[in-house]
Image (tube, rainbow, N blue to C red):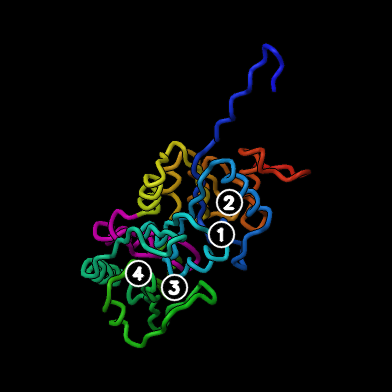
Amino acid sequence: MTAAGSTVPAPRALPYKLIATDLDGTLLRHDETISERTRDALAAATAAGAAHIVVTGRAVPWTRHILDSLDYQGLAVCGQGAQVYHAGEHRLLTSVTLDRQLAGLALSKIEAETGPLLLAASRDGLEGEVLVAPGYRIQEGPLPNVMIDDPGELWAAPLNKVYLQHPTLDDDALAGVAREIAGDLVGVTVSGEGIVELLPLGLTKATGLSLAARRLGITAKETLAFGDMPNDISMFAWAAYGVAMANAHDELKAVADEITASNEEDGIADVLERLYPCTAPAGAEGTTA
């Protein structure tokens, strides 16, 4: 009951209705785990009414085990925006594939400038394999992949993306050449160390995030996004507020609204505990960078 003449305070509005988090280098620590503090901060924010969506460059087969370990039941955007996946129902809602003829033409044009490239590719679907041609250096630790002897096998079935590496050019230089030479045929992004990707033209993380948000009835101006690599730039441009991790690539930091602590130091929790005060555990103090 309230005292005579008093009013019941209005419920506090959520600062953001949607929290979009990248996985590697952002939500996940280097050992592919999520700290209890970050888990608690996300759980409390969602209990308060916010939705959480994972938005990752990984295709579904490289993402499912993490979502399952979190008992994650909602939507996830995978494959750089190519796939919207319903984790609770274990099914793909949307999937965009790379035009293999265009990708082959793009690759030929890039190699005419750079010389031979080292290649891998991600096949489409819930069970899509990552095929790795000779010389390509896998950066994702124990995640499943299939080594092949003939690079021609990469093109035998529908693909989400093609991975490029060069014997001497670094990631940023290789991506720059690829955009200049073939940017009218395919999308090009850097999503991690040693990971330069060719994607369907116009596809970005923002593409998939906007589709997933629309299914939830949530708009860009109600969205908070966390990331660490240049492939998160489009997501920051779409969302109302973008937070880069302390370990983020300089290109992403340059367009971020805020820089938080690293993925190893609970950077996501620092922000959520400040924006959603009910999420902070007793005695904890949020920090800003």
Discs 2, 4 touching: Cβ within 8 Å: no
Q: Which residues are magenta?
A: 174-203
Query: Is the residue marked by circle 3 packed among few (<14), some (14-19), or many (20+) residues within 10 Å?
Result: few
Nearer to us of marks 4 and 3 is 4
Q: Position of residue 21 (x, y in %)?
A: 51, 52
Residue found at x 64% / y 17%: 7
Label 2, label 1: how far apart the Cα atoms are: 8 Å
Task: Give yes or no for contact between labels 4 and 3 (Cβ–Cβ under 8 Å).
Answer: no
x, y (%) of residue 104?
A: 24, 71
Q: Which residue is mark 3?
A: 168
Foreground: 23 or 173?
Answer: 23
Comes first in the chain, label 4 or label 3 = 4
Mark 2 or 4: the one toward you = 4
Query: Residue 102: x percent and y percent?
Result: 22, 66
The residue sitting at 66% across, 43% down in the picture is 279
Going from N to C along the chain, the mark reached first, 2 or 4, is 4
The reply to whether dot 3 and dot 2 touch (C-beta < 8 Å) is no
Left or right: 219 as drawn, with respect to 150? right
Mark 2 lies on a secondary structure that is loop
Please give left or right for residue 190 compared with residue 285 in the image: left
Judge whether residue 183 is colored magenta.
yes
Q: Amino acid at mark 1?
A: Gly
Residue flagged by tag 2: what amino acid is it? Met
Give the spatial CA distance, label 2 vs label 4.
30 Å
Which numbered marker is on residue 25?
1
Asked if the residue under mark 4 is in contact with the one under mark 1, i.e. CB atoms within 8 Å, the reply is no
Dot 1: element:
loop
Q: Which mark is residue 245?
A: 2
